[in-house]
Image: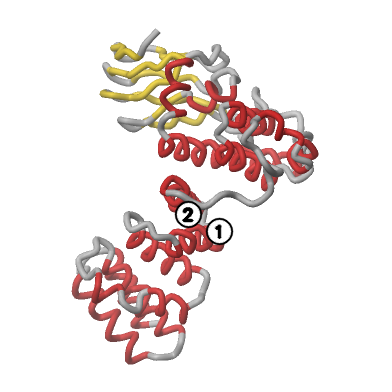
């Protein structure tokens, strides 16, 4: 069928919630929005899609109906992949595949959290039109069938994390899915193979997502794995975020150690003022007021007129 670019007029529907998932889209130009239901409030959630962002991936891969309605706000152009073409594309591009898995698992984590809160409130009558547990399980099976064992393992590890008592947990733990792929040599919950570049990119992106959720412990674990690797592309950013996590976790001594050579080696880093703030504030928490003032005054001077400068002033006065 091929890959093609399709033009949509303003206020057009790309697809409706519940439609058969036979296409994946990439926004090339224009403005589009997705509309879905919030599980807890049952209110409409509108999400703007960025240029270059994929739409409909999790539904096509898991073979579940589209879970949201997508429409255009302005005249727009979208690149359209039919299901077979997208499968061929994603299976040949590990980086995009892993990024897709991270986004998918985070969406499932949020859905799982919402469902748990609803059950805790005894509002079990409210439910999703698709089964996120089954979606994740079927996604893992899909990758095993395609001999993408590491990616299948990733899905099953996420399943184990989200659904420790789930209906498919025995199949996963006993390794009965091994026959799906001839390359599968151990239980999907067993040891993973050596991390490659895609795995490091995955750890980094997961760390950023955990940061956004304010789960600094998990984020710290992810960034630590990046720092332990030989990956140079993400290392400076991982070092910055790792220090921020340590600060948020109140591990002030480790935060200072994390940034010990940062100021001299990466003085032109775009968040160098934030680094100085974390170091200065950490010194304050450790009782070294002289070192604290040295860093915080520099932040006030370098970031004058910004919220960070006001935070530094507040720390100095506190």
Give residue 311's position: percent from left, percent from top: 34, 71
Give residue 132's position: percent from left, percent from top: 65, 32
The relative height of residue 303 versus residue 125 in the rendered view (above or below) is: below
For image coordinates 50% across by 58% down, the residue present is 222
The relative height of residue 17 versus residue 186 in the rendered view (above or below) is: above
For image coordinates 27% across by 70% down, the residue present is 309
Q: Which residue is mark 2?
A: 207
Task: Identify the image quadrant of residue 9.
Answer: top left
Foreground: 5 or 34?
Answer: 5
Contact between marks 1 and 2 (CB within 8 A): the answer is yes
Q: Which residue is mark 1?
A: 218
| Left or right side of 13 for 63 | right
Give residue 84's position: percent from left, percent from top: 47, 15
The relative height of residue 51 versus residue 13 in the rendered view (above or below) is: below
Q: Secondary structure at mark 2?
A: helix
Sequence-wise, which precedes: disc 1 or disc 2? 2
Q: Which image quarter is the N terminus in?
A: top left
Task: Identify the image quadrant of residue 86.
Answer: top left
Disc 2 packing (10 Å; few <14; some 14–19; many ≥20): many
Foreground: 122 or 75?
Answer: 75
For residue 117, the mark is: none
Check the image and name the residue furthest to the top: 1
| Left or right side of 300 for 18 | right
Q: How many marks?
A: 2
Gap in Å between the C-alphas at discs 1 and 2?
Answer: 7 Å
For image coordinates 45% across by 49% down, the residue present is 196
Q: Which image quarter is the C terminus in?
A: bottom left
């Amino acid at each position: 069928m091929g890959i093609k670019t399709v033009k949509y007029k303003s206020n057009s529907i790309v697809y409706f919630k519940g439609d058969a998932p036979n296409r994946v889209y990439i926004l090339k130009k224009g403005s589009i929005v997705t509309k879905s239901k919030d599980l807890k409030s049952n209110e409409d959630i509108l999400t703007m899609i960025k240029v270059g962002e994929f739409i409909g991936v999790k539904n096509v891969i898991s073979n579940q109906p589209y879970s949201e309605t997508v429409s255009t706000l302005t005249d727009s152009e979208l690149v359209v992949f039919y299901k077979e073409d997208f499968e061929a594309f994603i299976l040949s591009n590990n980086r995009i595949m892993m990024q897709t898995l991270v986004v998918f698992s985070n969406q499932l984590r949020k859905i799982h959290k919402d469902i748990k809160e609803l059950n805790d409130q005894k509002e079990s009558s409210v439910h999703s039109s698709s089964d996120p547990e089954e979606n994740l399980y079927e996604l893992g099976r899909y990758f095993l069938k395609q001999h993408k064992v590491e990616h299948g393992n990733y899905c099953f590890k996420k399943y184990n994390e989200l659904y420790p008592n789930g209906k498919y947990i025995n199949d996963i733990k006993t390794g009965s899915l091994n026959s799906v792929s001839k390359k599968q040599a151990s239980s999907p919950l067993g040891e993973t193979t050596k991390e490659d570049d895609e795995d490091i990119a995955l750890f980094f992106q997961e760390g950023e997502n955990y940061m956004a959720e304010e789960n600094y412990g998990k984020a710290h674990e992810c960034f630590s794995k990046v720092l332990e690797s030989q990956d140079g592309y993400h290392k400076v950013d991982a070092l910055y975020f790792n220090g921020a996590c340590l600060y948020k976790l109140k591990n002030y001594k480790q935060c200072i150690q994390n940034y010990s050579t940062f100021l001299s080696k990466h003085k032109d880093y775009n968040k160098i003022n934030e680094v100085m703030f974390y170091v200065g504030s950490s010194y304050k928490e450790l009782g070294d007021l002289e070192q604290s003032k040295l860093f915080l005054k520099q932040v006030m001077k370098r970031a004058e007129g910004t919220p960070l400068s006001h935070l530094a002033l507040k720390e100095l006065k506190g």
